[in-house]
Image (spheres, rainbow, N blue to C red):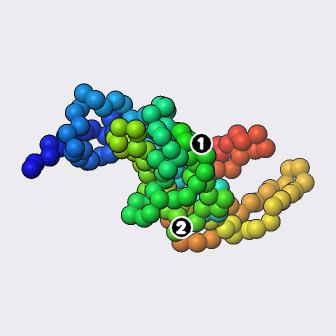
Amino acid sequence: MLIPRIRLPNDITGHNDFDYGDGISAEGLERNPIRLSSKHLDPENTLILRQGKPLMIECVYARDDIADISDLQWHKKGARPIDGGSSSRKKNLHFTAIHKRDEGFYQCRARNLGGIMFSREVRVIVLNEITWNDESHSVGALVGEPLTIDCGVKGNEEHHQITITDNEGESLDGM
């Protein structure tokens, strides 16, 4: 017996190329009810942060048609579900200090009462920790004397974006 398959766009299910079988019709599907939020999440659902920094991503199922907390899960691509806690409609992915080994794609998956699976994916990129050439936290000079600050970074990363700012975060470049 052949089972009909429907290919659904990413914006409805959250999957890039996912087939649904079991005779589910496209008319019965609604927009993806899963919403992801995090302080630094960009429009492509990518988070870039330094090693050692904390990370929390909230996954919210925005409807009431989910039965149990076990129907909402975080998964690292190619791995088992990640344990976590919250309500049956919200689940957080939390790292107190992220490391290079944590880098990769994570999916929040939800199964509604009708058995339809929805997901949203987020990509986590972990940059190496910054080690400054000069580890002192303060420098000083008398008024009128030149002041040299070493903003060099140790390590082998090629692309470092260093911006020198005042105490209010305004750039000092071009002064």
Report helix, strand or loop for mark 1. Answer: loop
Q: Quadrant of residue 155?
A: bottom right
In the displayed structure image, the side of residue 125 where residue 129 appears, left or right: right
Marks 1 and 2 sit apart, C-alpha to C-alpha, by 29 Å
Residue occupied by mark 2:
100
Q: Quick one: label 1 or label 2, which is nearer the N terminus?
A: 1
Residue occupied by mark 1:
87
- How would you rate the neighbour count of disc 1 (Cα within 10 Å): few for under 14, some for 14-19, many for 20 or more? few
Q: Residue furthest top?
A: 27
Q: Position of residue 18 (x, y in %)?
A: 26, 47
Q: Position of residue 140 (x, y in %)?
A: 86, 57
* Amino acid on which disc 1 is placed: Ser
- Identity of the residue drawn at 20% across and 39% down: 23
Q: Position of residue 12 (x, y in %)?
A: 33, 35
Give residue 40's mark.
Answer: none
Residue 26 visible? The answer is: yes
- Identity of the residue drawn at 32% across and 45% down: 15
In the displayed structure image, the side of residue 72 where residue 175 appears, left or right: right
Residue 120 visible? The answer is: no
Labels 1 and 2 touching (C-beta < 8 A): no
Q: Position of residue 8 (x, y in %)?
A: 25, 39
Is residue 93 depicted above or below 13 in this figure? below
Q: Residue furthest bottom?
A: 155
